[in-house]
Amino acid sequence: MITLTNFKGSTFTLNAMYIEKVEALPDTTITLVNGKKYFVRETEAEVSQLSQTFYKNIGMFPWHQQVGETNGK
């Protein structure tokens, strides 16, 4: 799980395993595998780093890299 900040300043926790892609459009937009979108204050690079840390913490970072999801995208 990663903690993110919405544009109202509230934080929320998101399961990084459901992230399909992260884009800067220019606001950072996270699209989940079910199509739901979240707009957050963190940069694309910050979300990527949080996601990578999450995968490392649960011991799945090597798998994360094998399926082509480098940079948390």
Image (tube, helix red, strand yellow):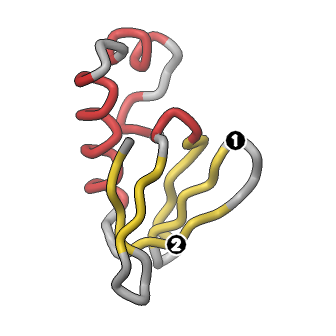
Name, please, the residue furthest toward the right.
34
Q: Amino acid at mark 2?
A: Phe
Reading the image, the residue beneath label 1 is 33
Q: For marks 1 and 2, give the CA distance.
A: 15 Å
Above or below 6: residue 57: above
Q: Residue at x 75, y 52 (%)?
A: 35
**Which quadrant of the figure has residue 7?**
bottom left
Say which element carries label 1: loop
**Which quadrant of the figure has residue 54?**
top left
**Which quadrant of the figure has residue 40?**
bottom left
Q: Position of residue 22 (x, y in %)?
A: 50, 53
Q: Amino acid at mark 1?
A: Val
Which numbered disc flags the more N-terminal residue, 1 or 2?
Answer: 1
Q: Tell me if 36 is positioned left or right of 38 in this view.
A: right
Reading the image, the residue beneath label 2 is 39
Q: Position of residue 65 (x, y in %)?
A: 39, 17
Q: Tell me if 3 is positioned left or right of 69 in this view.
A: left
Q: Which corner quadrant holds the N terminus?
A: top left
Neighbor class of circle 1 (other Cα within 10 Å; few <14, some 14-19, many 20+) is few
Q: Residue at x 47, y 78 (%)?
A: 26
Q: Position of residue 33 (x, y in %)?
A: 69, 41
Q: Residue at x 42, y 19 (%)?
A: 64
| Residue contact at pointers 1 and 2, CB within 8 angstroms | no
Q: Position of residue 30 (x, y in %)?
A: 54, 58
Neighbor class of circle 2 (other Cα within 10 Å; few <14, some 14-19, many 20+) is some
Q: Tell me if 13 is positioned left or right of 19 in this view.
A: left
Q: Nearer the viewer, residue 38 or 73?
A: 38
Q: Nearer the viewer, residue 71 or 38?
A: 38
